[in-house]
Image (cartoon, rainbow, N blue to C red):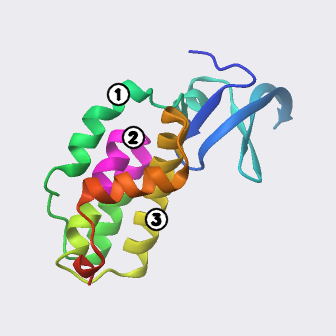
Amino acid sequence: MDFQVGDKVVHWTYGLGEIINLEEKILSGRTSLYYVVKVNDLTIWVPSDENGKRSMRLPTPANEFENLFILLSSPGEPLSKDRLERKLELSQRMKDGTLESICRVIRDLSFFRKTQKFNESDTLTLERAQKFLLSEWMISFSIPAAQAEKELKRLLGDHPSDQK
């Protein structure tokens, strides 16, 4: 699938952005075509070859969110109590780049937080995953951030007293 200027895309590292241009760049003596993607106040250049295309995808359509909502409200799977093992596992899931993997990270970290103390890495990973999910959710449903956040908290069964 080729992307077009104006397409909203999700980059697996940077999140939701928009393709604003196609540019040829010369790197190491080789000319290649790049998608110029604006993500918030950041501009990134993504190769238009297969490797680059694998790092981006179109936002998930609204009709595919129902399964994600079921996933988010399901019981969390246990995570390793070893912080380094947990960080590696969560990092691998985030690199997958699919919204399903991101939802699993959110669900499982939210479940983990109810019984274990969070460290800084856990907090940052959860915040990043939620930012990715919520930005895509807002675009897919054309709703404000506050509405998406409220619904996410409801799906996760989050209450302030649940957090350690």
Q: Quadrant of the C terminus?
A: bottom left
**Which residues fall within the magenta stretch?**
93-106
Residue at 50% across / 33% down in the picture? 140
Inter-mark Cα distance, 1 to 3: 23 Å
The amino acid on which the numbered mark 1 sits, given as a three-letter code, is: Glu
Front position among marks 1 and 3: 1
Whether tag 1 and tag 3 are in contact, CB under 8 A, the answer is no
Residue 29 can be seen, yes or no: no
The amino acid on which the numbered mark 3 sits, given as a three-letter code, is: Glu
Residue 127: mark: 3
Inter-mark Cα distance, 2 to 1: 10 Å
Locate residue 30: give its quadrant. top right
Mark 3 crowdedness (10 Å alpha carbons): few <14, some 14-19, many ≥20: few
For the residue labelled by badge 1, is the local secondary structure a helix, a strand or a loop? helix
For the residue labelled by badge 3, is the local secondary structure a helix, a strand or a loop? helix
Give the side of residue 6 with respect to residue 30, left or right.
left
Inter-mark Cα distance, 2 to 3: 15 Å
**Residue labelled with disc 2:** 99
Nearer to me, 144 or 109 = 144
